[in-house]
Amino acid sequence: MLKDGTSVSNEVIQWKCVESRIESKRLHYGRFVISPFKKGQANTVGIAMRRALLGEVGGASITSARSEGVAHEYSTVAGIQETIHDILVNLKEIVLRSDSDGNQKAFLSVTGPKRVTAGDISLPPSVKVIDDSQYIVTITQPISVNIESNIECDCGYRIESLNEYRDGEFPVDAVFMPVRNVNYSVHPFGSGKEMREILFIEVWTNGSLTPTEAISKASKSLIDLLSPFLHTKHEDIPDFESNRDSSSLMKFSSRVDDVDKSEGEIPKNTFIDQLELPARASNCLKRAEIHTISDLLSYSRDDLLKLKSFGKKSVDQVSRALWERFATELPNDKPRVVGEE
């Protein structure tokens, strides 16, 4: 965000954190106020910041785990209470903070009987576990458990394929999102030509970043995305009509054709955050392991109604958002007449 203030239209936009609290090791909350904006500007900034916070702010996550002598993901091991699948799920949920962008290794080597938690993992110096008490596995007999994990940094979700891993290495569906939820609201003040707006942004993180750090990273990401437009001059833009070498034009036309051919198709791993659903509906879907639009479209309206705490209102919100953003519907929705509200 704007740290000290930036002059826009002869007015200085300022921001500050008006509320900050740590609800638990893995849930930090911050509330920020930014003003004054001209009419319409606050909503523009609010939408952009929400998308950047959820989609552009990266984090660290375990992406794979290796253990010798394990045949497959659903194996059981004598003396271990959980299946290998349960252990992988627990590793996925461990919250990490990394000061390095490179891939790194973590090691878990313990002898039972013991209740194993995230605090028992040996990590490289640049990686820190946010909550040492996060549960991994219970060893019920005097045996040793040795797990080597791979840690990576990225953004969003990564859905792994079991076919890409061999020799006892198992993929983990990684969650690289330190920002758990974002809300924003716009409040007008003044009247007539003096009408201005105040923007409030609420941020919840998993503890690997503070809400203030998340706001700063999201702002930098937006600035980096837009900065090329600030430094581009008209003479720097290729003039296809006067360019004797038509290769640039051919490449440009090819890209346009590719976009036209893909129009109407939904990328397989588009996340449900793009639907901008209310927090209740979004959280219910994620608890049901529905993270992408592809996951969502495998459910009918009746299937969604069977989810815990997911009522007809939430189903209607999902259906409306799918149609408005991707022009598609849930499997057993009735065909929509164009122009129908």
Image (tube, grey):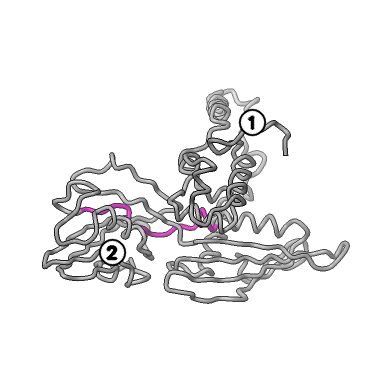
The residue that label 2 is drawn on is 136
Q: Are marks 1 and 2 in contact (CB under 8 Å)?
A: no
Distance of mark 1 from mark 2, alpha carbons?
59 Å
Q: Looking at the picture, which amino acid does disc 2 mark? A: Ile
Q: Quadrant of residue 190 in the image?
A: bottom right
Magenta highlight on residue 59 = yes
Residue at x 60% of width, y 58% of height? 49
The local secondary structure at tag 2 comes to strand
Which segment is the magenta one? 53-66
Residue 146's spot in the image, x, y percent?
A: 17, 60
Q: Which tag is nearer the camera, tag 1 or tag 2?
A: 2
Vertically, is 128 above or below 154? below
The residue that label 1 is drawn on is 239
The local secondary structure at tag 1 comes to loop
Q: Looking at the picture, which amino acid does disc 1 mark? A: Asp
Of 42 and 158, which appears nearest the observer?
158
Of 149 and 118, which appears nearest the observer?
118
Residue at x 57% of width, y 54% of height? 51
Residue at x 44% of width, y 52% of height? 288
Residue 327's spot in the image, x, y percent?
A: 61, 36
Residue at x 79% of width, y 64% of height? 196
Q: Residues within 10 Å of mark 1 (few under 14, many from 20)?
A: few
